[in-house]
Each structure stands twice: as C-alpha cells, then as structure tokens.
Image (tube, rainbow, N blue to C red):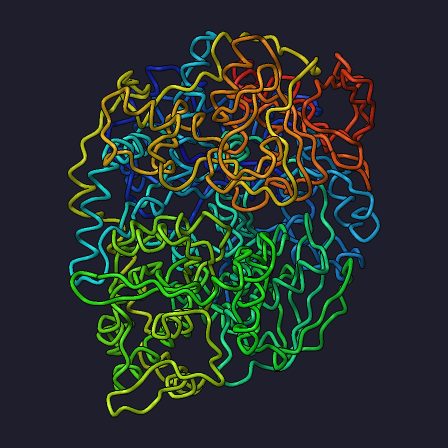
C-alpha cells in the first residue's frame, strides 16, 4: 500500500526530501488499514512510467540497527501498480489518508527528523528545466568540491552517488562515502562498501526458485510469530519469462505457435505460480512468455538510465539473477549478475556488501574494418581481458573509438562480461546512448531529463569537449582496425580462433588429447564419412559436420547490424542457388518482437526462411541448451559412430554438454557466420580458399560471394529499424497472450503448496528454524564427495538441460507417475528442490578424478568403494551422519550465475568446498547457503599436497563468530596425518553474519521478524 505524503519543514533541503517521499506502508500497518487499501487486482502487466522506489539500504549484519532501519518497509518509493486504487484520484486518495492519518502523523514527524539529519543535505540541488521549472532534486557530486571526484571512473561515481544519497550513518556511513571518494587509494586495499541497487531483474529459471523462496519465507516468518506480509520486495522487481521455450519445432512457418503451445503445456503450473507471485507480492512485474529475452527487454524497455522518483533523481542500477545482466552496462546503467540468493536478499531490503572494485580502463581507437562484426570484436575483447585478468573488477571503456560503436555493439561487449570475468563492462552515457534511447521509444522529455541530470552530476561523456584524465587501476588499448573475423570454441568462449586459421585449428583439436582444445580422434578415423538416410534422401556426416546452426541469444539478437547481416547472407545465398542441407537443425530466436518487425520491413526474413532459419520463438533457446531434439536419424548417426559433431550458434556460452549432448564441438559466431557455416555444413573449411558450395549455374560459390559489406548492412539498418517498432512492440508486451491470459490463479498471499506437484515444492531450508542463530560450525571427519580439476563450471554443478532417463531425477519423476516425454528440463523444474538436488552434479560431461578417467555424473562412495550416482552417494553419507566436502581446481563455479549450484550441494550435505580459486558469484552463493569456501595457498592444490580424495577431512573453524576474520588462515587436517593451510573465503563481515545464521535467507527472516 502506498500513500503520498507532503510534509513541511523549515529546512529547504529537508522540505525537498519530504516533498519527494512517497511513504510505503508495509506489514507494520494494522490489518484493517491494509484491507481498506488492497484488492485482488492483478499487477502483472501494469506499466507505469519508469518511476521506482528510491534506493535506500537496509540493515548490514555488522552495523547497528535503529528506528530508521526498522522503517525499511516504510520507505521512499514510487508505485508500479495501482492495487485496485486510483492514486491519481484526489478524492479517493484523501479518503484513504483520513483512514490512516494517526499513523501518518507519527511517520511524518520521523521523516521530518530523518530529512533534516541527512549528512549530505547540503548538496541536494535543483535541476532546472530549459523552459522553466525543474526536473527535480539530486545529490550533486560537484557540490562536494572534492578534486578527487573528477578523476574517478564513471562507474565508481555511480557507487559514490548511491552511498551519498543513502547515507544515514547507520546502513551507509560517511566513512563509506570517503572510501569511495578516495577510490584510487582505498580500492587496492580491498575495502568493503555497502551498495543498494535501484532494482532487481529476474528470468524465469532463476525467478521461480526466488518466488518459491519468498513464499516459503512467508510461512517461516509466520511460524516465528511475525507477520508474513513483511516478506515483500522492497525494490522494484522485473521478471521476464524467457528461459522455457525449446526448439521442438524448427524449419516451419508455424514454429513459433507450435513451440509456444508446447511451452505452456509443459510449464503451465510454474507459469501459474509466477502469475500468482505477481499478484501476491507487491512491487513485482512479470513479463509473460513469448515477449523476448530478459536482457534485450531490459535494454530496449526496462532500463531507465536515470530514475525520477517523485522529484529525486538518481542513476539507474540493477542486479540480476543472470550473469549477462551486464548487457545493460552498454546503456550506461550499472548492472551485474548475482546469485538468486543474493537477489532475494536485495529484494527484501538488504544492502549488498561488496569489495570496492578496481577498474580497468579499456581504450578504444579507430574503427572496425569492412566486413568485421561486433561479434568479432567482443570475442577479441573477451580474449584480451581474460589474458589481462579482470575477475572481480569493473572494466570501463573510453576513447575516440567509442563514437564508432553503436549502442548495440556496446551492449554486445557488455553482455559478455562474465566470459571475460569482469563484474561489469561499462560504457558511460554519451550522445550515442541518447540517440538509442530515442530510437527505442523513450520520450524526448525523458531523454532531456537524463542528459541534464548526468551532465549536471559529471556522469555524461561529451567527446566533443576536452576530456578530464581519469585514473584507472590498469590500462588496455585496442585499435578497432586490428579486429579480424573470428569464432570461439570448441568448448570455451575465450578460445578465439581467427576465421583464416579455423581449418588448421580444427584439425589440431582432432589430434590433441581430450581437453578444452582436443578430442583425441585417431588419425585413421578423422576422415570417416557416415552415410545415412534422412527422411528418404541420402545424407552424410563426418567429424566437424554442423548439425545445429542457431541464431540465438541476447548477445547478438539485440544488434540490428548482425541480424540484418545474417539476412543479407541468406539473401545472397538464395540468389546464387545455395541451400542449407535439410539435416542441419536451423533456428532463429529473436530477443524481442522488434527484430521480427525489422526483418520483415527489410524483406530479408523470407530469405532466412528459405535457408531454414524460421523464427522458432522469443527466448533464449539454444544458447542455454533448449535446442530440442535432433532428428533421430541424425542422432543415431552421431552416437553410433562416435562422431564429433558441431553446433554453431550466436550465443555467449559453449561449454561442453551445454548446447546439446550430441554436439561435442560448439562454436560461438556472429549471426552472419552462423548462416555461412550452416551453408557450408562443416567447420572443417577454410573460407578463404575452399568453396562453400556449388551455385545454380554449377560454379563454386565462395565466402566472399555471400558476405555483405558494412555499407550494405548500414543502409538496411537505416531504412528498416524504426522507433515505431519499439513503441508498438512494448505497448503490446503488457497485454500478454492468449495462453497467459487464460491462466487462473488464487488471490491468497500465502501459497497453497501441492504435495503432489513435481514443479513447485516447499523447500526444507527453514524447517525447525528458531530465532537464535546456530552459530559457526567447522567440519569433522568429512568424506570427499567429488575431486575436480580446473574450470568446473556451474553448468557442470547445477542441474541444466534435459533430464537423463537413468538419472536419480528421472527415477524420482517416474515414481510420481511422470512419463519420460513429460520430464521437461531441469531449468523448468527449478521450483522443486527434490528434482534439483537429484540433478546436482548430474552433467554427463563432468570429470570426477575419483573415477580415474571415467566421465559422467557418478562418484565413489569411499567407505564401500561402490560407484554411485553423486546424489545417491551423498544421501548415503547423509543417512550415516557423515559430512562431505568437494575438492576442486581453479575457476571453480565459472559460467552462468546459478543459485542451484549452491543450493544443490547444500541439500546433498556438502559442508565445504576447497578450490584453487572461485568464480565471484558462485563463491558468494556458497556462503549464502552456509557452505564454507576455502582456497588452497598459491602454488598448492590437491595434487601438490598429495591428496587423493580417499582421506577424511577436518576443518578447524572457530566456534565463535567474533573469533573469525574474513580471509584468515584455516588449518585442514586429514585422517592420514596430512595438514595444510587454506584461506577462508568469507570476504566481508556481512558474509560472516550470513554464515552465523546458517545462510542469507535465515539472516533476513530473523532480522525482519525483529522489526
């Protein structure tokens, strides 16, 4: 419930703050007041102007709580939905204010005091409009008159503004502000700061478990004797359903409708659950299936750049439960991926505790050569930054080359931040950004406000003016003219291969021993040709044959240049008489409806259709493993002959086993190159020297014959990509579709769990929870559940892709009457902890050293020596009362942010992970689920220490939180007399508090219960 209050104050700064406050009443109001304001009206599609709640942090574990922190549910915010009330009606508003006036008077007095006491009230300034009046008030960085601010990277200025605006000397202290201002000196010291994002972004795979957790948290807080309505998002939450559509039907004019029909049949229950969540929880917007990919929708529609919340202006910022949330950095919005666990806490008012990052300055100069794409550029940048080392850092792009990159090109680079390891790949706002905002349908007044605010607060880059030198932690430079056409693979995004070297690289991969760049195919087998019948016509495959060619993923489908470039390649190929072989599974999955409109406007979609690239749906599809089945004849030819078949996709991830179980080689490429490789039918080709095929006149057709020039692409973009396309698409997005609108959901605020459901299940995290934290706990005589080498990704750990027919998850489903054809994917069942725990460590390509070379989702049960599925072994350990640990190498948990990569091991009984290094988000998620992350000392690992995994391990952790320090040394001993020292990877005091409570969600529940 929301009430706008306008309070008076003798202080000008206080008055302006109060004028800007929209006070939100949460569960602290009496139920009678609550019922007089609420209605069961659905909030799913309401789309107000992008005005959201102001970004004020809640309690940190190590900071004192106060009355002000207890008022976090009574916070400055702007409503997204009407809740059945016309807030623009003065009559209804006055009547409702009278109902709650005694409560309001008390809050007005408190808010007046808080406003007058704001430590930085003196720099609250007005932002004038060109024609008179003002846009609103803002906290002015120039008004601080501190010369250090002028040298700060733009990305750090966003953190600074947030700290200033939210400074109350409780959750955010003046000392935190000083740390950020003194970034040049404080960042190398790895100091900790609190940060409150303006909003949270979810997709449905991670959104379902988040809503499941919120629903179960309501019951937990009720069981503790508190009000369940305290569990509500306190910052705006946007959830886009984009991860569920699969490419079941391809190469068909009816593919979109057929795949959506199957999508709803498979996911009706979880979609209904999300629709319930949009009505049960305040401040949550759900964008229905068939609308687009979350990051493209964020870029084109949800991104605000600057918030204007009832007269207070501040930069947009966002954390999302998908690692590619960084795509919004291309728009000048600070955004990055966090685990679902962290996101849930942020929704509930917890400030993020983060280490003040170093910032790598990446200077761009020159311009791309003719025929070189943004995909070629991002793969080059990814390789450079991986080599430089940017894990845990921001990367900020600058230089005169910026003016030669479109906003879509920037977003492509920002999107792949997780692949190069950075927290953000940030592009400050400039004139290119403003042009894009206008193109995508943002109003002229909104764009004028954004520009005025950012200029006034020294956050806008104008390359026509002399540039102030900024300080960076380290520097890189790239001349765009040096970028050459390339792809990446066959198993990792940063293994870039120049196109001219691809044939030689492929043959090296066939020769090399099994690894990231090797398949160990014997020489005599490398030229093997497998002939088979494909629906009555002769067909053949060999090593390197392309069986999946997918234009997919937000990384590229948000970029009109490469999408229309793909259409031009298809057009030229059609005109020359080339045709993709029918056994290649081709697909086109745009990131928004806008893509379809400009492909139709340009006349190029018909040529893509002729080559089999029909639109199959609006979602992530092949990029996340939702590639659907291959034709049985193709699948048999691959499996029966042990072929190394290839997939070529315009995605951002190509880890083995992710795209499809039968494609062992997976290459990332631009959409035009996807079409070119589909036409060639193999990755075993030198495009410079070998023909792609034979044309209708019998002549050989080469790559250069079908490749468009940059000028050709630019002309089509100019004539085909129009602002009206964005406006009409996003006006329609709020209306849903017939499948979604037919879903009926209950109106209760507590979810009615169905014990028979195999999609939505109440998790056990809060069973038996009390108000007293359990405290720290070490590990005693634990067995090693798994022994890994380097680069174990969340795709290996977390349940993903299809559910194998012989797996523990399949057994669970079949025991409950689910037919194999209805298994659906692990991603679709993320709301059921029973399925997900069984699917943890179930990747068919996982390499567990305990198996002595055997690949697959099994391990050795040490006490008996039996080889079991990982889940079955884990349950045997748990039933016997034994702790377990995981031993791992470098980059443990790299890849997409997946909450189940931490939740699953916790449910399996894993108490600690000891690794050479961790991916940032995954380490944080382990802490959030109460698992201890430890790092071997530099130069040490399981091999150098002589650990076989057969030992039992004891981790000597202090039993008092006060005796534990972030990053301290911890001794690990084994039952055979070995002893070694590890670094405890609780990186902040807040993470220690989470561990003390048994996890971040338990911490939140206990704190909210006390308020």
* Residue 781 placement (x, y as % from top left): 70, 13
* Residue 788 placement (x, y as % from top left): 63, 36
Looking at the image, which residue is at 33% across and 24% down? 811
Asked if residue 294 shows in the view, the reply is: yes
Looking at the image, which residue is at 57% across and 57% down? 518
Residue 979, placed above or below residue 292: above
Residue 79, placed above or below residue 458: above
Residue 567, placed above or below residue 457: below
The one nearer the camera, 807 or 898, is 807
Q: Residue 831 sits in which quadrant?
A: top left
Position of residue 484 in the picture relative to residue 528 (left or right): right
Q: Residue 600 sits in which quadrant?
A: bottom left
Q: How many marks?
A: 0
Looking at the image, which residue is at 55% across and 34% down? 342
The residue lying furthest to the front in this view is 524
The one nearer the camera, 962 or 683, is 683
**What quarter of the picture does the N terminus occupy?**
top left
Position of residue 221 in the picture relative to residue 757 (left or right): right
Looking at the image, which residue is at 48% across and 64% down? 526
* Residue 625 placement (x, y as % from top left): 39, 48
**What quarter of the picture does the C terminus occupy?**
top right
* Residue 508 placement (x, y as % from top left): 58, 66
Asked if residue 776 shows in the view, the reply is: no
Position of residue 979 in the picture relative to residue 436 (left or right): right
């Amino acid at each position: 419930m929301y009430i706008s209050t306008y309070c008076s104050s003798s202080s000008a700064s206080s008055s302006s703050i109060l004028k800007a406050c929209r006070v939100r009443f949460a569960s602290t109001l009496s139920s009678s007041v609550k019922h007089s304001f609420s209605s069961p009206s659905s909030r799913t599609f309401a789309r107000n102007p992008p005005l959201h709640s102001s970004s004020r942090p809640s309690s940190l574990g190590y900071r004192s709580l106060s009355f002000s922190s207890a008022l976090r549910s009574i916070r400055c915010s702007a409503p997204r939905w009407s809740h059945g009330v016309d807030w623009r009606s003065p009559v209804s508003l006055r009547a409702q204010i009278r109902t709650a006036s005694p409560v309001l008077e008390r809050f007005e007095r408190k808010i007046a005091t808080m406003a007058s006491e704001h430590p930085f009230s003196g720099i609250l300034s007005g932002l004038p409009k060109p024609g008179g009046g003002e846009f609103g008030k803002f906290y002015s960085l120039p008004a601080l008159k501190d010369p250090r601010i002028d040298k700060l990277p733009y990305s750090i200025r966003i953190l600074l503004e947030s700290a200033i605006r939210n400074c109350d000397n409780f959750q955010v202290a003046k000392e935190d502000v000083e740390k950020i201002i003194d970034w040049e000196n404080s960042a190398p010291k790895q100091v900790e700061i609190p940060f409150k994002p303006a909003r949270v972004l979810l997709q449905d795979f991670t959104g379902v478990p988040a809503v499941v957790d919120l629903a179960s948290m309501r019951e937990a807080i009720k069981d503790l004797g508190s009000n369940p309505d305290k569990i509500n998002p306190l910052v705006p939450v946007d959830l886009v359903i984009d991860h569920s559509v699969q490419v079941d039907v391809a190469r068909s004019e009816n593919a979109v409708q057929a795949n959506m029909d199957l999508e709803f049949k498979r996911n009706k229950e979880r979609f209904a659950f999300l629709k319930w969540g949009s009505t049960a929880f305040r401040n949550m917007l759900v964008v229905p299936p068939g609308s687009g990919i979350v990051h493209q929708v964020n870029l084109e529609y949800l991104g605000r750049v600057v918030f204007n919340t009832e007269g207070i202006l501040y930069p947009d910022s966002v954390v999302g439960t998908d690692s590619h949330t960084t795509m919004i950095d291309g728009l000048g919005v600070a955004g990055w991926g966090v685990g679902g666990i962290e996101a849930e806490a942020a929704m509930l008012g917890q400030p993020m505790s983060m280490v003040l990052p170093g910032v790598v300055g990446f200077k761009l100069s020159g311009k791309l050569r003719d025929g070189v794409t943004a995909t070629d550029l991002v793969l080059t940048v990814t390789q450079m930054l991986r080599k430089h080392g940017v894990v845990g850092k921001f990367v900020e792009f600058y230089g005169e080359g910026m003016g030669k990159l479109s906003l879509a090109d920037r977003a492509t680079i920002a999107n792949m931040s997780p692949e190069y390891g950075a927290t953000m790949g940030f592009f400050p706002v400039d004139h290119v950004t403003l042009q894009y905002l206008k193109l995508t349908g943002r109003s002229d007044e909104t764009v004028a406000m954004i520009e005025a605010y950012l200029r006034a607060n020294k956050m806008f880059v104008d390359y026509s003016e002399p540039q102030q030198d900024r300080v960076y932690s380290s520097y890189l430079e790239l001349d765009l003219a040096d970028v050459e056409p390339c792809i990446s693979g066959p198993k990792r995004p940063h293994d870039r291969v120049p196109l001219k070297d691809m044939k030689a690289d492929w043959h090296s991969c066939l020769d090399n021993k099994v690894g990231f760049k090797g398949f160990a195919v014997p020489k005599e087998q490398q030229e093997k040709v497998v002939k088979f019948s494909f629906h009555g016509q002769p067909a053949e495959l060999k090593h390197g044959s392309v069986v999946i060619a997918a234009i997919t993923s937000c990384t590229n489908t948000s970029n009109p240049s490469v999408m229309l470039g793909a259409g031009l390649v298809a057009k030229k190929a059609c005109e020359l008489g080339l045709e993709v072989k029918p056994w290649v599974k081709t697909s086109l999955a745009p990131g928004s409806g806008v893509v379809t409109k400009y492909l139709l406007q340009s006349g190029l979609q018909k040529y893509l259709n002729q080559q089999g690239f029909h639109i199959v749906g609006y979602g992530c599809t092949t990029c996340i493993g939702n590639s659907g089945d291959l034709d049985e004849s193709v699948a048999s030819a691959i499996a029966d002959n042990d072929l190394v078949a290839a997939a070529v996709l315009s995605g951002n991830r190509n880890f083995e086993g992710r795209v499809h179980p039968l494609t062992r080689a997976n290459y990332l490429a631009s959409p035009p190159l996807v079409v070119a490789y589909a036409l060639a039918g193999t990755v075993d080709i030198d495009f410079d020297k070998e023909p792609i095929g034979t044309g209708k006149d019998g002549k050989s057709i080469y790559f250069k014959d079908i490749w468009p020039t940059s000028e050709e692409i630019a002309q089509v973009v100019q004539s085909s990509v129009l602002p009206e396309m964005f406006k009409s698409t996003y006006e329609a997005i709020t209306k849903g579709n017939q499948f979604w609108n037919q879903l009926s959901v209950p109106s209760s605020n507590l979810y009615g769990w169905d014990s028979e459901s195999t999609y939505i299940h109440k998790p056990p995290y809060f069973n038996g929870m009390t108000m007293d934290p359990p405290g720290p706990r070490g590990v005693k005589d634990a067995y090693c559940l798994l022994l890994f080498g380097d680069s174990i990704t969340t795709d290996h750990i977390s349940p993903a892709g299809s559910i194998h027919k012989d797996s523990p998850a399949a057994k669970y489903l079949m025991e409950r009457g689910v037919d194999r054809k209805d298994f659906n994917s692990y991603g679709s069942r993320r709301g059921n902890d029973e399925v997900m725990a069984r699917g943890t460590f179930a990747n068919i390509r996982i390499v567990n050293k305990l198996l002595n070379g055997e690949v697959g989702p099994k391990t050795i049960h040490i006490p008996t020596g039996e080889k079991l599925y990982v889940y079955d072994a884990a349950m045997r350990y748990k039933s016997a009362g034994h702790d377990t640990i995981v031993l791992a190498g470098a980059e443990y948990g790299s890849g997409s942010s997946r909450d189940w990569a931490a939740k699953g091991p916790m449910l399996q009984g894993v108490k600690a992970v000891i690794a050479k290094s961790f991916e940032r988000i995954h380490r944080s998620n382990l802490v959030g689920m109460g698992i201890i992350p430890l790092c071997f000392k530099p130069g040490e690992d399981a091999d150098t220490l002589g650990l076989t995994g057969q030992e039992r391990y004891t981790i000597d952790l202090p039993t008092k939180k006060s005796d534990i320090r972030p990053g301290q040394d911890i001794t690990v001993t084994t039952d055979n007399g070995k002893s070694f020292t590890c670094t405890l990877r609780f990186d902040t005091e807040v993470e220690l508090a989470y561990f003390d409570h048994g996890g971040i969600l338990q911490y939140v529940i206990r704190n909210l219960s006390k308020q």
